[in-house]
Image (spheres, rainbow, N blue to C red):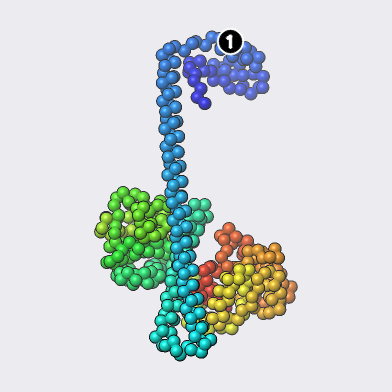
Amino acid sequence: MIIWFKPEVVQIVNWAGEPKKLEMDDGRIMPRKSFAQWQEQLKHTSSQWSSVDMKVCREFKQIVLEVIVKQAIKSKQEAKIRQKKQEEFVDTICHEIRNPINGIIGSLHMIQDKIKVIQRHIVSESLSDMGNADFKSHLQEIEDAIHDAQVCADHQTDVANDVLTLSKLDNNKLEIDVEPFNANQEVRIVCRMVMSQLKKKNLKLDLNLPEESMVVKGDSFRLRQVLVNLLTNAIKFTDQGSIKVSYEAQDSMLKFTVSDTGIGMTKEEQLKLFQPFSQANTSISSQYGGTGLGLSISRQLVNLMGGTIAINSERGKGTTFSFTIKYEPMTADDMELLQESKERTPTSPSIASLLNFKKVLVVDNNEVDRRVLVGLLIKNGFVCEIASDGPRALELFSSTNFNYVLLALNKDTSGVNGFDCIRSIREFEKSNRPQDSLPVPIFWVDCDEEKVKEAITSGVTDFVERPYEVAAILQVFAKYQ
């Protein structure tokens, strides 16, 4: 609503502190009744607006209405663009998820078919008739199918991780951890992660790292996430040539650079980068794949780490991404703690032997996940007992001395959730185990950040993430050896 008035007839009125009296702008004080009479009198003495006043008001009203209409049209157009981007993003995500699923299903069918062929020959006792070359060919096809399924599964994991990270960033639920890390080591770890992709495209990797590595404090996990995004992008859009990775210290910042000799981008395409649900060119998604989330996530992570990210690119001549992050220098106490941690952590070859024949209680109401986890543990020398619900877990725990408990239980058929189960186990320990005995380490699988506090309060010792990685599980177990 727009209210028009003539400024010369406006009076400023303040309360004088007494309910029945009012103070005028000229200092006069009058009873409330008198004020009402004065107000009524003022209405009849107000001068009429001139034709010029009315014309100005009409013109001004028209201008305001035009501005409001233009703003409404602009807002509607922007909403349509946002909706279109979100629809395109959903389509892309569905495409990125559906294609790997098709690959996994196809690979599993291939494996099943090949195993059936071998089984038929075994049953008919004619395996020797198959011929050595045919047998090797079947085994090779099975191995290739398993590799293809693994690649598809890894891709799906990357997509899921990107969506989860973006959700946390949008809801301000992602926090930066400040821990000691070795910068050279982190860059080398990321390069090893993408080495198979480099070899597949016959690309050269050029590493330019300081001779003396920097050990500083920051979030190494998020640093790795940004580097992986930039390196996988560089490899994806480079068909020949090389990828260069380097870093250097600049005051209280570390500056990382990733360069490629790939397809490059125009200035217009560069303007679309770092926006969620967007890629530099609409044809890129169909030709190269990807969700268009990587660079948006990278920019937000870099900002959270106190730095900035920039691009320098030219169509047909490659692309260079550079970003900075703040770091904290290591103190003498930090260095001492880091050294002690290294001395306590067993080396990889020794971990398996340390943990051989340890008893693990696996509590999971998902049959497939449970079978996968138990298979990995048994293969690495553990002895496992299985529970699919809370009551069964407590029953097994009370009758067996376990070294570890691995729990992935949301809510089972008996209505017991994971935290209830853990609390029951801890209560049993207090009542039935010697007071000087150490509590059995309990590891929670895939705990949401919002539930970490509740998990620790209920008695969780540490956390394990899915998809299960044997090395990661062994490292966590070894900490509580």
Q: Nearer the viewer, residue 93 or 405?
A: 93
Residue in the picture at 41% in, 56% down: 292
Where is residue 325 drawn, in percent x and y?
40, 58
Location of residue 372 by image quarter: bottom right
195 vs 84: above or below? below
Q: Is residue 152 visible?
A: yes
Secondary structure of residue under mark 1: helix
**Residue 446 quadrant:** bottom right
Residue type at tag 1: Gln
Q: Position of residue 156 (x, y in %)?
A: 47, 64
Q: Position of residue 462 (x, y in %)?
A: 58, 69
Left or right of residue 383, residue 224 in this image: left
**Nearest the camera: 29 or 200?**
200
Residue at image location 45% in from the left, 42% down from the top: 79
Which residue is the extreme one toward the left? Answer: 317
Direction from residue 9 to residue 273 in the image, left or right: left
Whether residue 302 can be seen here: no
Which quarter of the image is occupied by the C terminus?
bottom right
Q: Which residue is mark 1?
A: 41
